[in-house]
Amino acid sequence: MTKTIKQEVPATPPAATNKLAPYLPGIVLFIVALAIGLLTYQDYGIGWDEPYQRAPTILTYDYMFHGSQEMFKKEEDNNHGAGFELVLLFIEKGLHLTDTRDIYFNRHIVTHVFFLLCAFSGYVLVLRLFKDNRFLASLAFIIFAFTPRMYAHSFFNSKDVPFMCMILVTLAVSRAAFDKNKSWLYLVTGLACGYATSIRIMGVMVCGFLAMFLLIDLLAALKKKENLMKPVLNMVSFVVGFCFSLYISWPYLWRHPIKNFISSFTNMSHYQWGATTLIGGKAIVATSLPWYYIPTWFWITTPVLWLIAGLGAICWIIYELSKSPAAYLQNTRERNFVLYILCFFVPVLSIIVLHSVVYDDWRHLYFIYPPFVLLALYLVDKGLHNKYKMVVQGLCALQVAMIGFFMVKNHPFHEVYFNEMVSHDDQYLRKNYEMDYWGNCYKQAFEHIMENDNRKKIYVCSNLSAYVENNLLILRPEDRVRFQFTPPDSADYFITNYRGHPDDYTGANVYYDITVLNSSILQIFRLKATDVRLR
């Protein structure tokens, strides 16, 4: 009797789509966010700093391609690197954009797409950091991409947000470098960190943290009498990548790399800005800010659940670190969280200790937000691995829904988000904290006047006319010429975002009012028919 022998069929190799599967939620979220951005990017006005960011970059461009030396005549313009601004200018030149409306719309959408791409790198980072947890990675993308203030700034803030984004990318690449311990990954980490520093010089601080861990690896190899070639090569690769990227992307360093870098760092550390900023109802000179300035702004503008989770995670990790420091300092997964704590705390402490000038909420330190979010996710992950999993997921969904409701209701003024830790009573926020301090809402002011006033020439005034005029640049050419700035006694309308004047204007005839969280962020007063006192 013949015995049938069953031949085993080799298992079909997994399809390429299986490798892609863990990334699909992030890709879907990215596409949805990109679609929203493409549909709404023209709703955002021009921030006060945008023209002042673009102008020095043109001088840098002329130096690079025409040998002009004009950029060296104003040293204060070189305190910030031109890394990202040059990208915006290259695209502008490549598309042959000449009208200011096209130029600023282009800047806004390019900056936003860069922001979303970096948020996706955060998705990948969390996916790998927490063992392919797609829920946590998806939550990370939502937090990175849809925190209200950062989301709004991702259109019109071409310095603080791109720097924040590159810090997130640096953290993503450094995790891979720690995990794989490959020299080429340390090279890429150096390249990312160097490019971040070419946007804002504070990136050198993150470089120092990473170099510290590489030094720990070198000392550990020495103690164990292991081959030193690997840790030395890793350190050299990182330093070479950092220096190369920083030098290439910051033309100001081309003539005197070390001297000019030190000069920029010194100038930024002792930057002088003598105007006042509003916090807690007090107008305080920026050079004399109290120690609690940054902590207060962070406390009242970070969504509450992320705030609680982040602070809770910091306490947890510091406690665990005190019990077994080796587990957190050696090349383990936990090392990443020590890096995040350093990236969050040290910049804040340095601002307080050095009495550095900061203003306009905490935008100068937006780059501490990604490491804080990663710490918050550490605690969320703990909650997902016990019997309270459904509660944790429900709270996260509720916080996301609350943020989404705020953003839809108050579009496109997300930059004035305040959480529940501060009062939302009538006009409380306006009288106690800076609101739309960059005046992006002036775009809507001009558009409202145009829709309701068909005269060919409209006379307007403001308490900050020079900055209000920025938003004329984003109007159509034929609309731009309709507006003319004049003194109050000959103006038709007075426009204010209450910057520098948080109090009411007595006797005012309010023509248009934009409110967020029960506080006015912009008002237009009709003049000539009222005795409004503008001083």
Image (cartoon, helix red, strand yellow):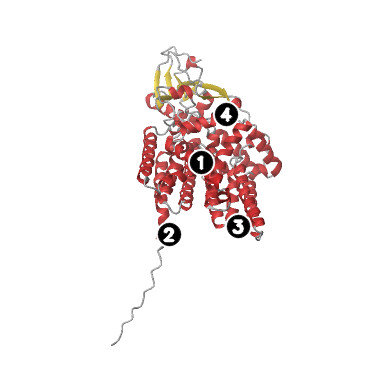
Q: Secondary structure at mark 3?
A: helix
Q: Amino acid at mark 3?
A: Ser
Vertical relation: 374 (above or below) 234: above
Where in the figure is residue 231, as x and y percent of width and height? 64, 56
Q: Amino acid at mark 1?
A: Ile
Disc 4 crowd, CA 10 A, few/some/many (<14, 14-19, 20+):
some
Q: Nearer the viewer, mark 4 or mark 1?
A: 1
Q: Amino acid at mark 2?
A: Lys
Where in the figure is residue 377, as x and y percent of width and height? 45, 44
How far is disc 4 from disc 1 in space, using C-alphas? 20 Å
Q: Which labelled disc corresponds to residue 314?
A: 1
Q: Secondary structure at mark 4?
A: loop
Q: Which residue is mark 4?
A: 291
Residue at 33 percent across and 78 percent down: it is 6
How far is disc 4 from disc 2 in space, using C-alphas? 49 Å
Q: Earlier in the sequence, mark 2 or mark 3?
A: 2
Q: Which labelled disc corresponds to residue 19?
A: 2
Where in the figure is residue 3, as x and y percent of width and height? 31, 84
Disc 2 crowd, CA 10 A, few/some/many (<14, 14-19, 20+):
few
Where in the figure is residue 371, as x and y percent of width and height? 52, 43
Q: Nearer the viewer, mark 1 or mark 3?
A: 1
Disc 3 crowd, CA 10 A, few/some/many (<14, 14-19, 20+):
some
* Nearer-the-camera pick, 202 or 477: 202
Residue 91 shows up from this direction: no
Q: Earlier in the sequence, mark 3 or mark 4?
A: 3
Q: Nearer the viewer, mark 4 or mark 2?
A: 4
